[in-house]
Image (spheres, rainbow, N blue to C red):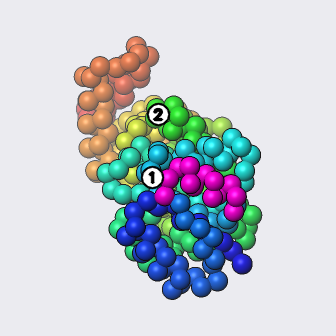
Amino acid sequence: MKTVVIVEDTIDNLEVIRYFLKKDYPDLQLAGEARSVDEAYALLARRQPDIVLLDIQIMGGTSFDVLARLDAAGHPLPQLIFITAHGVLENATKALRYTALDFITKPINEIQLRSAIDTAMQRLEAHDTMLEEVRAMLEQQRHGDRFDRIAIRLTGGVRRLVSVQEISYFQADREVTKVFLRSEKEPLTAAINIGHFTRTLQEDYAFLLIHQSLLVNAAYIREFNPRASEVVLTTGQRLATSQRGNMLMKNYVREREHGTLVSSGLRRHLRELLNGWLRGRR
């Protein structure tokens, strides 16, 4: 019988989770509950459950503190389902998005919980430990800076951690997304839509949605031709821009040319983009 532990310091949330687990997963044994960092560490180290539902913010710290202690002590990590609230520990929630770890948001509802647990059960069957992703998340939490790697769930069920700087662009292909990397000839196929990458990356990086199906890393844009409605990448690829994408590119070039730039090389790059745009208007 599979086992589950709940790490949550709010009674109301505990009762909701208990109710849904009993109702929807009668064969999933509740192996214990914890409300603090110390309680959670002791319980998870002792019971080693298959799945753990854990609130990010608990008494004595965060659930990340618990995971760091478990990993440092050599304990196996269970399937993880994080619980978070809107507006609380936004950096932690961002870390979960970047590392493709599952989380549900409060108030907890049955559909969300069932989807997360079903995914965890599938990963158990596939012996998917998520250890690399968890360690990447903990590393980012320790440094507190912007995230330099993103986990990409591939269509075969595998996840791969990729440097954001390696990504030249994303291309939507129905329900999946093609991920084009600088160092690889063939794109990766991500089992998630392009909206996920747009929401995750645009806050920290200059990724531009030049078309509803194309999200481009601005660092790879060599030329912009509004008359031809296209951008040319440093790799030589030509990508079509939509009408909205053209406006976005014009605004981006203008803002960066008149803003404070970090290097003369970047300034030259942006000036070349601006000149290309001006030539296209003639």
Vertical arrangement, residue 110 with respect to residue 42, above or below: below
Q: For this view, does 87 lie left or right of residue 160?
A: left
Q: Position of residue 238 (x, y in %)?
A: 48, 43
Which secondary structure is most common in the magenta stretch? helix
In terms of depth relative to the viewer, which is nearer, 184 or 70? 70
Comes first in the chain, label 2 or label 1: 1
In terms of depth relative to the viewer, which is nearer, 33 or 4? 33
Residue 27's disc number: none
Q: Position of residue 72 (x, y in %)?
A: 69, 41
In terms of depth relative to the viewer, which is nearer, 252 or 95? 95
Q: Amino acid at mark 1?
A: Ile
Between marks 2 and 1, how big is the CA–CA gap? 19 Å
Residue shown at 68% from the left, 50% from the top: 131
User: Is the residue marked by circle 2 packed among few (<14), some (14-19), or many (20+) residues within 10 Å?
Assistant: few
Q: Position of residue 236 (x, y in %)?
A: 54, 36
Total count of labels: 2
Vertical arrangement, residue 281 with respect to residue 126, above or below: above
Q: Amino acid at mark 2?
A: Gly
Q: Which residue is mark 1?
A: 58
Residue shown at 73% from the left, 67% from the top: 126
Q: Quadrant of residue 207?
A: top left
User: Is the residue marked by circle 1 packed among few (<14), some (14-19), or many (20+) residues within 10 Å?
Assistant: many
Residue 232 visible here: no
Highlighted range, magenta: 35-47
Residue shown at 26% from the left, 44% from the top: 247
Q: Label 2's element?
A: loop
Q: Quadrant of the C terminus?
A: top left
Q: Which residue is mark 2?
A: 144
Q: Position of residue 237 (x, y in %)?
A: 53, 41
Disc 2 + disc 1, Cβ < 8 Å? no
